[in-house]
Amino acid sequence: MSKVNIIYWTGTGNTEAMAKLIEEGAKEKGAEVKLLHVSEASVDDVKGADMVLLGSPAMGAEVIEESEMEPFVDSIASSVSGKKLGLFGSYGWGDGEWMRSWVERMEGYGANLLNEGLIVQEAPEGSSEEECRNFGREAAAY
């Protein structure tokens, strides 16, 4: 059984809703899942998992959340080389530049990324709910 840790930040609840759907999908595939708000997470939560999923909404000029998620990502930079990692988040504007930048950054740290990240405009609903569950299923099997 794979151990999947989902670490996220949410402002309006959209990224948290994504995290919970992703958790459902990973559990369906038999993964042991730990869901953590980034304020509760540590480097050990990254090191101790088979797969780490990080979630943040797009903020400001298409960047990840700057007061908690950004410092956390900085703190794990030296711990993700070779680590299986996935990125997800919600956005309200723009074209996903924040996710492309985040993917590039984590690849630069040597992470073994699941894909190019999962983004959902606003809250997950309809087909995007299933996309979140599928992301969790893929993460559990990666």
Image: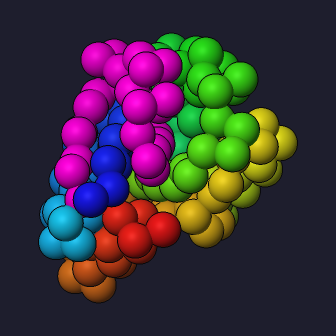
Q: Is residue 27 left or right of residue 80?
A: left
In this orientation, does residue 132 appear?
no
Q: Quadrant of residue 21?
A: bottom left
Question: Was residue 136 drawn as part of the magenta stretch in this picture?
Answer: no
> Against 127, is 78 above or below?
above
Q: Which residue lies at the image location 32% right of the left edge and 72% below the top edge?
A: 137
Q: Quadrant of residue 127?
A: bottom left
How is colour applied across the structure in the image?
rainbow
In this orientation, does residue 45 appear?
yes
Q: Is residue 129 left or right of residue 116?
A: left
Q: Which residues are magenta?
A: 31-57
Q: Which residue lies at the image location 58% right of the left edge and 35% below the top edge?
A: 64
Question: Was residue 41 drawn as part of the magenta stretch in this picture?
Answer: yes
Q: Which residue lies at the image location 61% right of the left edge and 68% below the top edge?
A: 115
What is the total number of numbered labels drawn onto the structure image? 0
Q: Which residue lies at the image location 67% right of the left edge and 54% below the top edge?
A: 112
Residue at the outermost right position = 108
Q: Quadrant of residue 93?
A: bottom right
Residue 135 on image: x %, y %: 39, 70
> Against 109, is 95 above or below?
below
Looking at this view, is 142 or 89 the one in front?
142
Looking at this view, is 12 or 24 the one in front?
24
Residue 23 on image: x %, y %: 22, 56
Q: Quadrant of the N terminus?
A: bottom left
Residue 24 on image: x %, y %: 17, 63
Residue 73 on image: x %, y %: 59, 26
Looking at this view, is 28 or 40 the one in front?
28
Residue at the outermost front position = 1
